[in-house]
Amino acid sequence: MESEAPLIGITTSVEADEQRLDIAYPDAVEKAGGLPVIVPVFKSREKATSFASMLDGLVITGGPAITENMIGDLPPDIHRADERRTQNDVWILEFFVSINRPILGICYGMQLISAHFGGSIYADVQKQLDLSSSHSKTRGASMHSVVLQHKTFLKKLLQSSETDSGQLIVNTRHIQAIAEPGEGLRISAIAPDEVIEGIETRDGRIIGVQFHPEGMGSDGAGLFIHLVDLARTTRDP
């Protein structure tokens, strides 16, 4: 009998007492064969982990600034994430890590994962690394290339979308960027200006990307398919 679609939790932003989510995230999960489940913002760790125990996989979506292990001060054009969101995301993330269930972190989500494992983050990577161009859509950036690192899961999952020069064209929407990845995380993608664009664990059960694969159509679909495939083993061991 065909197995049921795995339940994939999707975190949200919190703004003005509202949870908000770009519909592209659940669309990408559904297309990959998963059943999208919006993660509520809980007031207690107990309730958060009880809810998380029902999920087979997790997407931590994009959002505002991460401040844990941050280098420098936040610029005026980015604000820190709502504390309720951050606390809830940390509870869910910690539970998933503790039971080794698969996670995909996107932008803020990648940064949160790295911070959880002790990694550091630039408050304003363009200013602090004196980059000639921005990685932020709000500062005029649009698309740029990244180099997928050999023998990584990210390379395996996205190499079919690489250009003839061996680079992947991605969207870009971030002001912060990882300075040093957390313990146990390896770099899987780098921009031409050496900004870290991808991280992963060596077993591929946790993958983080700085770009937004949910907005890249078939070019980013491999990440969601990978997550759903791993999540299916959680449901059907």
Image (cartoon, rainbow, N blue to C red):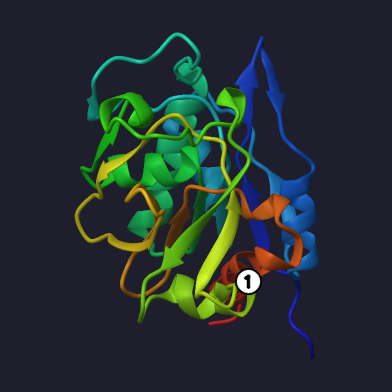
Q: Residue furthest front?
A: 132
Could one spot residue 55 in this view of the protein? no
Which quarter shows the N terminus? bottom right
Task: Between residue 175 and residue 68, name the one nearer to us.
Answer: 175
Reading the image, the residue beneath label 1 is 222
**Quick one: SS at disc 1?**
helix
Above or below, comparing residue 95 to residue 141 in the picture: below
The residue depicted at 60 percent of the width and 39 percent of the height is 11
Where residue 13 sits: x, y (%)? 61, 28
Where residue 136 sits: x, y (%)? 53, 31
The residue depicted at 24 percent of the width and 20 percent of the height is 72
Could one spot residue 109 in this view of the protein? yes
Task: Between residue 26 and residue 9, name the one nearer to us.
Answer: 26
Q: Tell me the amino acid under the disc marked 1.
A: Gly
Above or below, comparing residue 174 to residue 214 in the picture: above
Q: Is residue 13 left or right of residue 71?
A: right
The residue depicted at 63 percent of the width and 69 percent of the height is 228
Q: Which of the 4 image quarters holds residue 200?
A: bottom left
Where residue 171 sits: x, y (%)? 61, 47
Q: Which of the 4 image quarters holds residue 19?
A: top right
